[in-house]
Structure formats: C-alpha cells, structure tokens
Image (spheres, coloured by chain):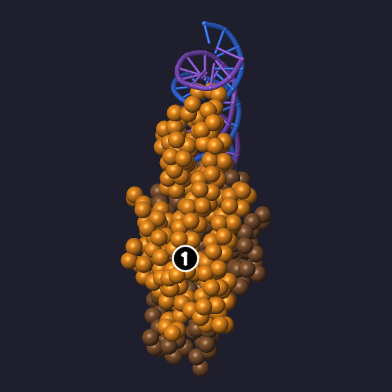
Chain colours: A orange, B brown, C blue, D purple
Amino acid sequence: MKDEKKRGRPRGFDAKAALAKARDVFWDRGFAAASLDNLSAATKLNRPSLYGAFGDKEDLYLDTLEGYRQDGMDALAEALDPSLPLRDNLARVYAGALAVYLHGETAARGCLLIGTATVEAVEHERVREVLGRSLNDFDGEIEKRMRLAVESGELPQGADPQMLAMLASAVMHSLAVRARAGDSRETLEAIASSGVELICGSVQRS
Amino acid sequence: MKDEKKRGRPRGFDAKAALAKARDVFWDRGFAAASLDNLSAATKLNRPSLYGAFGDKEDLYLDTLEGYRQDGMDALAEALDPSLPLRDNLARVYAGALAVYLHGETAARGCLLIGTATVEAVEHERVREVLGRSLNDFDGEIEKRMRLAVESGELPQGADPQMLAMLASAVMHSLAVRARAGDSRETLEAIASSGVELICGSVQRS
DNA sequence: CATATTTTGTACCGTTTCGCATTAAATTCT
DNA sequence: AGAATTTAATGCGAAACGGTACAAAATATG
C-alpha cells in the first residue's frame, strides 16, 4: 500500500524529510516568526509545492507538532521499560529529553511543543488542542509506570501515581524552558537528577 | 524627583498604563504576532508616539518583560514571608501565580515570560537574557527561604536548598505551561498542592 | 501518440508589516 | 510675546508577508 502508481508527475522530494526540515525552522523561530520563505529555503521546496503537500502554514506547523509528539511518545515508552527500576526510568527519560533539548546552534532549542506551541496556544485553538493532548498523553504514560511502581512496592502504598506523574512531567517542563533560557547542561542535569531523587524518595525503599 | 517640568509639550498619556496595555497584547499574541497596529490600538497611542516613548517593538516588549519580572519578584518576596511555615509560603506562591495565569479571556494566559519569551529566546539574545535572569532570580529568592528552612529545622539537615528551590520553581514552570495549554483550575491547584507536599516532605517534620 | 493528471517553477497579487518624515499642537524659557 | 522644545497626528514608503494563478514539465492511461 506504499506505491500504488499515481497518475501524474511524481514528486521530486521526500515529504518526511521536508517535514523534518520545516520542523527545524519552527523550532528555532517559532510559528509566527517562521516565514514561508524560510520554510521554502529550508525544505528546498517552492511555496506552491509546500502548499500542495501540506496545506497552509498552520497545517504544516500542526503536522510537525504531531510528528514530534509521536516521536516523543515512542521515546518515552522505550525509556520507561518496566523491567528497570523506576529511578533508572526517570533518569532515562530526562537524559533523552536533554539530548534533544540541547541540540541548538546558537542557543539551545528546548522542546518544540513547550518552546513554540505554548505561545500560539492562546489564539490558535488547534495548537492548544495538540499541546494539551501531548502533555496529557505524556503524563498518562508516566502515570502507568508510577501505578506499577506502587503495586510492585517500588513506591510506598500511599503514593498518588497521578500526582507523582504530573510532578515528574513538571521537571521535564522546567528542563524544556530552562534549556531555551540558556541554562548549562550541568545545571539541567543536576535538576533532572534532583528531580529523580525527590520523586522516587530520597531514602532508598528496600 | 517626579515632576521636574520638562520643556516641551507634555505627554497626553500615562506611560505606565500604556505599558500595561501593551503587555496584555504581548501576553495574548506573543511578541512576533503582536503588530504595532495591535499595540497602537490597545494603548491608544499612534505608532510614532509609541516609538518615541519606548523605542521599537523589541524595546517595548523588553520593557513589559522587565516590569512583569519586577512585579513577580515583589509578589514572590511577599509570599515568602519567613514568619509563616514553608508549606504556607509555597502554597501562597502557587496561589498567587495561578491568580495571574488563569486570568485569560478565551484561553488562560499563563506566565508572560514562560508563555511568550521562551519562543523568542533562541533568536533574540536580549530576550534570552531577561528570561534567564528572571528564572535565576526567582530560583534565588526561593533558595534563600529554603536555606532558612534548613537552618530552622523546617527541612531536614541533609536537604539541598538550591535543588529544592529549583524544583519548587519547576512546579511553577509547569503551571505556567499547563495553564496556557488549557488545563483547568482544579488540575492546576492539585498539582500545586502535590508539589508543596512533595517538596516539604509528605511526612510532617515536627 | 494523444489525453488526462499531478508536480514544478515563475511570477505576481493584495495586504500587512515596521519604521519614519513631516507638519500641527502644546508647553516652557527668555 | 516670541523662541525653543517636546509631543501628537497624518500619512507615506519600501519591504516582507501568505497565498495563488498560470504555464511548463513529467508521468500514467487509453
């Protein structure tokens, strides 16, 4: 179901790769400040091709957000491997995030969603929807792991999995913002590490 | 030192009030999407007056950020009254923040800095500087209170004031992002409350 | 080979953008 | 009163914006 030969002239570009290039532009500049000229130059598609393949600028932006969200959820699920201790799981989540967040040219890019969708969320309902759904899904995935940790005794019985998950997410949100604000890798790693300790309990529980 | 009579025609507007109106525009739309026409309409100043009083759009934006930062620091210092328990201090900080963050028209506005400066931080060095300084100062103020709490025994001896402060800030950052993503007041209050519990230790320490 | 269909490239359209030039108005200083 | 100085208002202007019309190119179908 990949290559049913289409009728007209075949595309001269890889839509997936173009989307990745567009995403980088949005990541650095944000939605509003990214011009179609910027996007056209980065993807090496002229505007009509861009428009034909992805729709208008907002459609294109939402596409990149959705792809980013999906990638993030995949990485999260992998990091939360339940055969590893909860501590390791969280540490892996944060380490993976920082590897992405700190990949900036001039200044660190942080998280695409938190860094660029948050501004637009107030006035663009579709952006707000994607952002909200992304945060919720992220929380939900961590919550599942927390619930497991309570059942297995990794966390004390009284612990609230949902709230612990949201606080674990909160540390991520903070890393995302601080990366973009210019904090050093060392600072961010220290925060991540402290977050793990606080959430998992500073005292080792058997 | 307020009214040394200046030479020319006096201003027909209150710069402070105009700045507040401009701030609201930036708060909803972000820096890039806020046009001078928007700002001019909101402040009821024509563009040349805006330009004359505050400089260009970026100067104006930086001015609003700086004012917001100052207001935030004042509110923080007040909330952290050391004659109250640390728990109450943090609860007051979060409650004060939510009162500001949830004041949106269509969707909640969140935090001006985290919601609108974070996008611009990558490409606008001056914005990144203000954002970074704001976050650091905020951390620092909480850290002072944490240090006090360790000395007074409110927190255990081994506690790390700096890291606890950064995690307390992390909860704020998360509230800021989630407010703008559309989370309900109840959700945000629950997160704030859980954050207080986690940071102060779920077990009451005499 | 002719036709239909899709993509590509150029060029353009109307609008909006930011910033300023210019002139009129209001106040102080001499 | 008159000069000096600052603010206010109108309007312009060059550039950038998002989006598209149109024709050429490339492929499949009949």
Residue A91 appearing in the image:
yes
From the image, which quarter does the N terminus of chain A lie in? top right
* Foreground pick, A41 / B154: A41
Q: Residue drawn at (41%, 32%), measured in percent from left and top?
A: A44
* Amino acid marked by disc 1: Leu
Q: Residues within 10 Å of mark 1 (few under 14, many from 20)?
A: many
* Relative vertical location of residue B104 with respect to residue B92 in this rendering, above or below: above
- Could you say which quadrant of the image residue A102 lies in? bottom left
Q: Which residue is mark 1?
A: A80
Q: Residue drawn at (40%, 55%), measured in percent from left and top?
A: A100
Identify the chain of the residue marked 1, using the numbered disc in the image. A
Counting the numbered discs, the total is 1
* Relative vertical location of residue B78 with respect to residue B51 in this rendering, above or below: below
Measuring from the top left, give residue D19's x and y in whole percent.
Answer: 58, 31
Q: Residue drawn at (40%, 60%), measured in percent from left and top?
A: A96
* Foreground pick, C15 / D3: C15
Measuring from the top left, give residue D29's x and y in whole percent.
Answer: 58, 19
* Relative vertical location of residue A74 with respect to residue B82 in this rendering, above or below: above
* Foreground pick, B106 / A26: A26
Q: Residue drawn at (45%, 35%), measured in percent from left and top?
A: A14
